[in-house]
Amino acid sequence: MSVNDTLTNEERLAELDLDTLKQLVGLVEYDSGGDPFPVTGWDAIVWAVGNATQTSHFFQSAFGMELIAYSGPETGNRDHMSYVLKSGAIRFVVQGGVDPDSPLIAHHARHGDGITDIALAVPDVDKCVAHARAQGAKILEEPHDVTDEHGTVRIAAIATYGDTRHTLVNRDRYTGPYLPGYVTRTSSRPAKKRIFQALDHIVGNVELGAMDEWVDFYNRVMGFTNMAEFIGDDIATDYSALMSKVVASGNHRVKFPLNEPALGKKKSQIDEYLEFYRGPGAQHLALATNDILRAVDEMVAAGVEFLNTPDSYYEDAELRERIGNVRVPIEELQKRGILVDRDEDGYLLQIFTKPTGDRPTVFFEMIERHGSLGFGKGNFKALFEAIEREQAKRGNF
Ligand code: TYF
Ligand code: FE
């Protein structure tokens, strides 16, 4: 395995090593030699928002992210503003239209705030695109070089669910702050201690009956493999009103649970998403932290709202039995509403925000893994009940 498919540049710069990443996001050993579409990790998560200037402020003040680069009218980009934020190894790129005719404005009018691009770091852009094309994927951008005084980036893009894309990026020959066209930009606000170090997974919501097609897309086009965790008919009909399967890149750095709605007693949270996003899209991002208590405390202090967990969750003798010893007293979890799940490999702590934009679409999960490679199966019931309480407040019964 070459060094290029072991760590992304960003992970190296963030001084994350394989052991730390293994703990944070759960990696596996794998031989990239036989992989038709090798993926090193995440490159960037690109957002279209109604006000990039203020969303950038929010991700700094409430999520502890650091402003590192910018493109906009002052740098010759008359179409939109684009702010690049980072936390540990992960970048968010927040974009909002300036020109009223910008395609970003139309995208935002239809979808609201959301993710346009889940960009992935790959060692060989051309090899990935050749494979994707042979498998029938829609190529949105052919492989090409973009160059400035900091060097050259090789880039291409393929379509995934809805209006979402995967840009494929190799920046091995580039030293600039993000991409050509961007300048270094920092904030005058005092830097915070970072709240999260890495991105664990991004969940996609797709239409009823389409989940298996998208699992097949990630298997065939991108060489992803299926992970054990899924939500099947059994759980769906009882309370969740969704079905879910998980695909992952060979090294498990990139994990994509895919949800489709199921018919339940109430309107599925996935249907609500599909209605308000006007189609398939990214539903939640799980941010990996090594200190979920501090993460929640700082985010709550900054005004982020998390889903509530009833006291009965923590008072359940079966839960206490199931989870055994965790690094913090259960009372500390209860105070903040943090959920805990254990499987044969270890445990995880997790908590979910309410939707962070105006529409009931995108939200975040904070996750602290201690050996568990799962997604919190034992918490699905409590979680979906909490989501349904929020849906009811919005008038979905
Ligand atoms: O990513 C997961 O699978 C967990 C649970 O609509 C989950 O975070 C699954 C579906 C969903 C919300 C959370
Ligand atoms: Fe999740």
Image: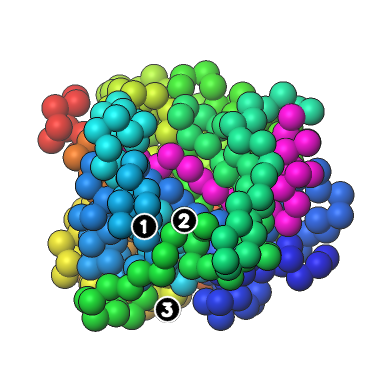
Dot 1 crowding, Cα within 10 Å, few <14, some 14–19, many 20+: few
Q: Which kind of residue does numbered mark 3 sit on? A: Arg
| Disc nearer the start of the sequence (3/2) | 2
Q: Is residue 295 above or below residue 91?
A: below
- Real-space CA distance between mark 3 and mark 2, rounded to the nearest whole angstrom: 45 Å
Q: Which mark is residue 327?
A: 3
In this figure, which residue is indicated by the disc labeled 1? 75
| Disc nearer the start of the sequence (2/1) | 1
Residue 124 is a magenta residue: yes
Q: Which kind of residue does numbered mark 2 sit on? A: Gly
- Which region shows up in magenta? 111-133
Mark 3, mark 2: which one is toward the viewer? 2
- Real-space CA distance between mark 3 and mark 1, rounded to the nearest whole angstrom: 48 Å
Dot 3 crowding, Cα within 10 Å, few <14, some 14–19, many 20+: few
Residue 288 is a magenta residue: no
The residue that appears at 83% across and 58% down in the rendered structure is: 31
In this figure, which residue is indicated by the disc labeled 2? 181
Q: Which mark is residue 370?
A: none
Side of 7 relative to 180 (left or right):
right
Residue 324 seen by the camera: no
Side of 15 relative to 360 (left or right):
right
Side of 261 relative to 55 (left or right):
right
- Position of residue 229 measured from the top left corner of the image (x, y, whole percent): 58, 45
Q: Is residue 145 above or below residue 345?
A: above
The residue that appears at 60% across and 52% down in the rendered structure is: 146
- Position of residue 131 measured from the top left corner of the image (x, y, whole percent): 78, 36
Do the residues under discs 2 and 1 have CB atoms within 8 angstroms?
yes
Query: Foreground: 393 or 47?
Result: 47
